[in-house]
Amino acid sequence: MKDFDLEQNEHFIKFVFIPYFKDIYNDLADKSDKKAKGINKIVFTEYANLPGILSERFFKILDENGDNYIDQKEFIHAMFKVYYSKLESKIKLVFDMYDFDNDGLIQKEDIRIVLSHVPISHVNTALSKEAATKEGKFTQEGGGLNLSFDDRAEMQKQILLFIEKIFEGRESLNIKQFTEIIEKVSSEMLLTIMTLVQERLPCSENFFRF
């Protein structure tokens, strides 16, 4: 776990963080069809409570060895990234969620698909002031799937305008370019995902009390 500052926080990590998430892992693995292999996709999807394709992308990233199960090491490593890692690691986590084909590049369509599944209340600040005034109407589960056709069209329009502004004529972004945008231009592509993940994971409520 090289991503994390372990020296300063060793006691908290050893006696609070790891035991806490081990208990959660064990509870989830007990519900899986193959406890010895870890948490399967169905159990994790129900637990993570993320809308649409975001749950699928998050599982894919956690399943580092690609065996369709999340083992204990993978689970705890991912929770470190979500809750306790440095900014660089969080940026890489979110970048990987956008990178559907795992080629180290994200396209405009990758961003559009992911943001379209984020409840609009999480992306309002990334969009125009006009869209932001509609927060009450756009605060829907699953990225606003219950909105009217006109409202969904407006939401997609604002997302596309945001993406065009971010990409500035480029066809794709690598991790270095993505990081520069997050740090110097707009952090919304990072914050919309990280905030949503931290809000939806049931463990967040108890973890943030520590």
Image: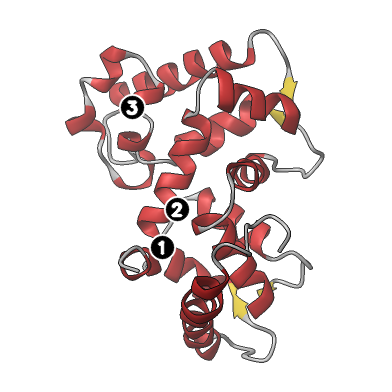
Task: Give the image quarter of residue 122.
Answer: top left
The residue that label 3 is drawn on is 124
The residue that label 2 is drawn on is 197
Q: Going 73% across and 17% down the picture, which residue do you hit?
A: 171
Per the model, the C-alpha gap separating discs 1 and 3 is: 21 Å
Are the residues at dot 2 and dot 3 in contact (C-beta closer than 8 Å)? no
Residue 69, given in percent of the width and then of the height, sits at 67, 75
Vertically, is 125 above or below 18? above
Residue 126, given in percent of the width and then of the height, sits at 41, 23
N-term mark: 1 or 3:
3
Q: Secondary structure at mark 1?
A: loop
The residue that label 1 is drawn on is 201
N-term mark: 2 or 3:
3
Q: Residue furthest top?
A: 169
Q: Residue furthest front?
A: 8
Q: Amino acid at mark 1?
A: Leu
Q: Residues within 10 Å of mark 1 (few under 14, many from 20)?
A: few
